[in-house]
Image (cartoon, rainbow, N blue to C red):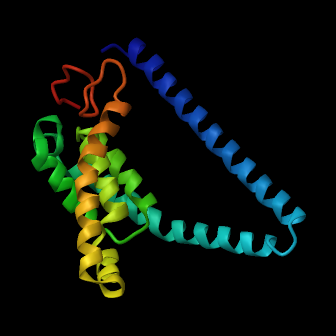
Amino acid sequence: MSDARVAPAQENARRSRRRKVRWDLLFLAAAAAALVALSLTVEGKGDRAWRASLENLREMAFILPAVLVIMGLFMVWVDRSLVVKYLGKGSGMRGMLICIALGTLPTGPLYVGFPMAAALLKKGARVSNVLAFLCSWAALSIPAELMELRFLGWDFMLARLAFTVTLIVPLSLVGERLCARPGETGDGGPTGADGAE
């Protein structure tokens, strides 16, 4: 590809990134303005709102850098063909079960899973498998299951697990249908893609 074609493509990508950053900053400014306005108008709630906001920011500042490093290592070290083989369009129920199992392992908040889900999609994972991963992270994490067992007992835990796992699969498949754009298959890539990056 000639330099003349690459330069406009890079410029378009830069413009797109700038536009996204502008929208993010606009949203952040609007949220901060709403927080200030509510703090001034609702007595006694402002301090608590500011403390909660700062606590969330502190938590994200500690967790997200590590997640981004792990995501970068995943993008570099894990071959796309491996992800496509085990989690791509042809992986079937095995891929779905692998993603559900992977989703039970993390203990962090759900927003940590979103960059990982994006990395899986970029590597060629099927959309329904990524949705199953996120659903499993949200509803089936092992530490939460142990707490549920301790406080609610075996019967409740097993009944909820059965319903949750039974619903994750069809909901992920429906979600894949809803996420599909024209010209794309359910595996996160364009129709007829050969799997090359």
Q: Is residue 117 visible?
A: yes
Rendered-image quadrant of the C terminus: top left
Q: Across the whole image, how many numbered discs are drawn on residues?
A: 0
Q: Position of residue 88 (x, y in %)?
A: 17, 39
Residue farthest to the bottom? 150
Q: If the image is split into quadrants, where does the N terminus sit?
A: top left
The residue under the point 29% across, 67% down is: 160
- Please state which of residues 84 and 3 is positioned toward the viewer in this rendering: 84
Residue 53 screen position, x and y as percent: 66, 67
Above or below, 103 against 11 in this view is: below
**Is residue 144 placed above or below 72 in the rendered structure?**
below
**Residue closer to the observer: 172 or 80:** 172
Observer-nearest residue: 18 or 60?
60
What residue is rendered at 28% in x and 56% in y? 73
Left or right: 60 as drawn, with respect to 194? right
Q: Position of residue 29 (x, y in %)?
A: 73, 49
Q: Position of residue 51 (x, y in %)?
A: 70, 74
Residue plotted at (35% across, 72% down)? 107
Q: Residue at x 34, y 49 (%)?
A: 117
As drawn, is 125 to the left or to the right of 109?
left
When asked about the image quadrant of residue 164, the answer is bottom left
Q: Is residue 76 left or right of residue 7?
A: left
